């Protein structure tokens, strides 16, 4: 049953994006693609020949390909990524060129990617932190214990609860909530599947606003919110984050470090006094810069979750 539903949902076309950058920008470029919903990423080192011809060498976690990195890769790396839907890079191409000046980019439409369908079929119920159980719709286990079920449709937006950048945020979320309800209003910048906003609403935040770049992603987030019975308290928008977006007691931004740094003033502004700002999508090499940036704006680092590649952090904004 579940597999059939997945087959129906898998898109017929994908945008294949090929970008060539200096080797030093490899991790940041891969993170950029994953942030845009890429389900597979392949690397090639032109001076060594092509690697991984059979499909993606990475799906989700950078740590998976540590062993495959060549000792002497040369000066440039070519990263190829597959993003669901036709022409999705029309918006992203400009942002890619802004983030990686001098990047060479090509895009083309390609047919169905069976490996992605396979990944969706393999997606399992996942326990996250102490309180959440993330369930692909139709795969709810019989025994869920006392965990809070967070249902997600097997769509294409980022945020299935299997990637550390999301898990770190959910763990921080449940720590902030403690034993009581979360206070007030939530802003989720880069909402993807809506998983973080939905998690906060399930922990009894009053309302949430989810921002993302494309309507397709926002449709998925809204579907997921309905699925979890919190649709009436969840609003989505494709408008860019500005100081006028409002003030929120809890702000999530699971983006990449460069985007977070670019948005530092606005993210600080939209966090209400006494509120929390949760940042993720940060490779360890950017940790110090992020802490310095937000502490210099008057916030205090309050929580940190890390694995071998990524760090998620929470900052508290003083009440006065
Ligand atoms: C890593 S995903 C996070 C998804 C989800 N919040 C989670 O934690 O799993 C980042 C999301 O941010 C969106 N995004 C990237 N840059 C953005 C920006 N400047 N404004 C709003 N959304 C952005 C991407 O489209 C993507 O859906």
Image (cartoon, grey):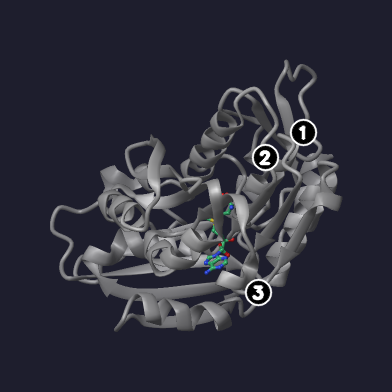
> Which one is nearer the viewer's eye here, 76 or 172?
172
Residue sitting at the far front: 320
Disc 3 or disc 2, which is closer to the eye? Answer: 2
Check the picture and name the quadrant holding the N terminus: top right
Please name which of the two marks, 1 or 2, marks the residue nearer to the observer.
Answer: 2
What residue is disc 2 on?
183
Picture residue at 52% right of the left edge, 55% below the top? 253
Question: Within 10 angstroms of label 1, few (less than 14), some, or many (20 or more) residues?
Answer: some
Q: Secondary structure at mark 3?
A: loop
Q: How far apart are the alpha carbons under marks 1 and 2?
A: 31 Å
Residue 109, picture quadrant: bottom right
- Nearest the viewer among 297 and 37 is 297
Residue 49 appears anywhere in the view: no
- Vertical arrangement, residue 32 with respect to residue 183, above or below: below
- Label 3 to label 1: alpha-carbon separation: 33 Å
Query: Where is residue 46, by image quadrant?
Result: bottom left
Chain-order first, disc 3 or disc 1? 1
Indicate which disc, 3 or 2, sits on the residue closer to the N terminus.
Answer: 2
Mark 1 or mark 2: whose residue is earlier in sequence: 1
Query: Residue at 63% across / 39% down in the picture?
Result: 122
Instruction: Residue at 31%, 81% (x, y): give it.
Output: 101
Quadrant of ligand 1: it is bottom right
Q: Which mark is residue 239?
A: 3
Q: Which residue is mark 1?
A: 139
What x and y, as percent, mark residue 19?
38, 75
Ligand 1: does it lie within 8 Å of the C-beta at label 3?
no
User: 221 or 50, which lies in front?
Assistant: 221
Instruction: Calculate the distance from the C-alpha at mark 3 to the C-alpha at mark 2.
Output: 25 Å
Local secondary structure at mark 1? loop
């Amino acid at each position: 049953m579940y597999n059939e539903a997945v087959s129906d949902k898998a898109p017929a076309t994908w945008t294949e994006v090929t970008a060539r950058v200096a080797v030093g920008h490899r991790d940041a470029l891969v993170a950029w693609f994953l942030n845009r919903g890429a389900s597979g990423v392949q690397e090639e080192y032109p001076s060594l020949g092509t690697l991984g011809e059979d499909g993606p060498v990475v799906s989700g976690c950078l740590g998976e390909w540590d062993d495959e990195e060549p000792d002497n890769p040369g000066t440039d790396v070519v990263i190829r990524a597959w993003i669901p839907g036709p022409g999705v890079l029309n918006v992203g191409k400009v942002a890619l060129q802004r983030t990686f000046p001098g990047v060479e980019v090509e895009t083309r439409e390609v047919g169905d990617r069976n490996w992605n369908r396979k990944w969706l079929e393999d997606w399992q119920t996942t326990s996250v932190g102490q309180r959440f159980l993330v369930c692909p719709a139709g795969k709810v286990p019989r025994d869920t214990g006392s965990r809070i079920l967070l249902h997600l449709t097997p769509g294409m937006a980022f945020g299935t609860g299997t990637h550390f950048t999301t898990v770190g945020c959910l763990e921080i979320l449940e720590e902030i909530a403690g034993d009581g309800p979360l206070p007030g209003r939530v802003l989720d910048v880069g909402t993807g599947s809506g998983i973080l906003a939905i998690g906060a609403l399930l922990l009894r935040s009053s309302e949430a606003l989810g921002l993302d770049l494309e309507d397709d992603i926002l449709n998925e987030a809204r579907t997921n919110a309905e699925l979890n019975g919190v649709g009436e308290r969840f609003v989505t928008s494709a408008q860019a984050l500005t100081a006028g977006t409002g003030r929120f007691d809890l702000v999530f931004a699971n983006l990449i470090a460069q985007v977070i740094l670019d948005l530092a003033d606005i993210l600080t502004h939209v966090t209400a006094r006494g509120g929390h700002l949760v940042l993720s999508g940060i490779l360890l090499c950017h940790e110090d810069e992020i802490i310095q940036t937000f502490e210099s704006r008057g916030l205090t680092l309050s929580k940190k979750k890390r694995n071998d590649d990524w760090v998620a952090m929470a900052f508290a904004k003083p009440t006065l």
